[in-house]
Image (cartoon, rainbow, N blue to C red):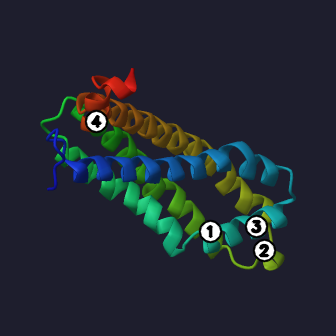
């Protein structure tokens, strides 16, 4: 691990920063679904709802999304390991715990619901689209709110850890500049 003149591991700061960015992206995805996408789709008829959700579920499975979805987990886990002796470690471990729960909600509830919706077939050919929607919408929306709250809590914990990390290792440049004539 590379260190600067104050002894602060730069790699650890970079990983913590990257984890915070990835978590912010994921929290934002879940948030926008809770605040805009699902309320908008709630206004749609059953066939449109099923078709659009199917399209979203197909399109969201892409490398960019998976990079942040899995990256938030991996980067937070690496940061938790790197911070195990740091004063901010509890914040990183709390973030990891919250995001692991959000990740589990996604894989245990939301993804299986998405799969069942896809298994219903072409929305134009579904005999009872209202029943398909009924088995999907309320449960999916409720658990999305849970994962939005968990990932937002994880983001807040990582932001706090990043703030404490910076405060624990002040910049050598700023410390030297504070005592110089030029800074007065």
* Quadrant of the image containing the C terminus: top left
Q: Secondary structure at mark 2?
A: helix
Q: Which image quadrant for residue 155?
A: top left
Which label's residue is closer to the chain start, 4 or 3?
3
Which label's residue is closer to the chain start, 2 or 3?
3
Q: Position of residue 43 (x, y in %)?
A: 86, 50
Mark 4 closeness class: few <14, some 14–19, many ≥20 residues within 10 Å: some
Distance of label 3 from label 1 (alpha carbons) = 9 Å
Q: Secondary structure at mark 3?
A: helix
Name the disc covering residue 57, or none: 1
Would you say the residues marked 4 and 1 are in contact, meaning their CB atoms lie under 8 Å apart? no
Q: Which residue is mark 4?
A: 171
Would you say the residues marked 1 and 2 are in contact, meaning their CB atoms lie under 8 Å apart? no
Q: Position of residue 53 (x, y in %)?
A: 70, 64
- Residue at the (27%, 29%) spot, across then down: 175
Which one is closest to the eye, mark 4 or mark 1? 4
């Amino acid at each position: 691990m590379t260190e600067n003149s104050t002894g602060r591991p730069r790699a650890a700061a970079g990983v913590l920063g990257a984890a915070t960015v990835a978590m912010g992206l994921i929290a934002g995805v879940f948030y926008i679904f809770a605040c805009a996408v699902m309320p908008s789709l709630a206004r749609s008829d059953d066939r449109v709802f099923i078709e659009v959700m199917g399209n979203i579920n197909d399109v969201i499975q892409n490398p960019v999304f998976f990079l942040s979805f899995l990256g938030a987990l991996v980067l937070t886990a690496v940061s938790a390991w790197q911070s195990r002796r740091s004063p901010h470690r509890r914040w990183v471990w709390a973030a990891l715990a919250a995001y692991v729960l959000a990740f589990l909600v996604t894989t245990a509830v939301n993804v299986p619901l998405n799969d069942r919706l896809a298994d219903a077939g072409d929305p134009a050919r579904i005999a009872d689209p209202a029943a398909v929607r009924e088995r999907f919408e309320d449960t999916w929306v409720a658990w999305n709110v849970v994962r939005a709250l968990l990932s937002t809590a994880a983001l807040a914990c990582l932001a706090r850890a990043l703030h404490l990390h910076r405060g624990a290792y002040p910049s050598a440049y700023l410390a030297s500049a504070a005592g110089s004539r030029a800074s007065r």
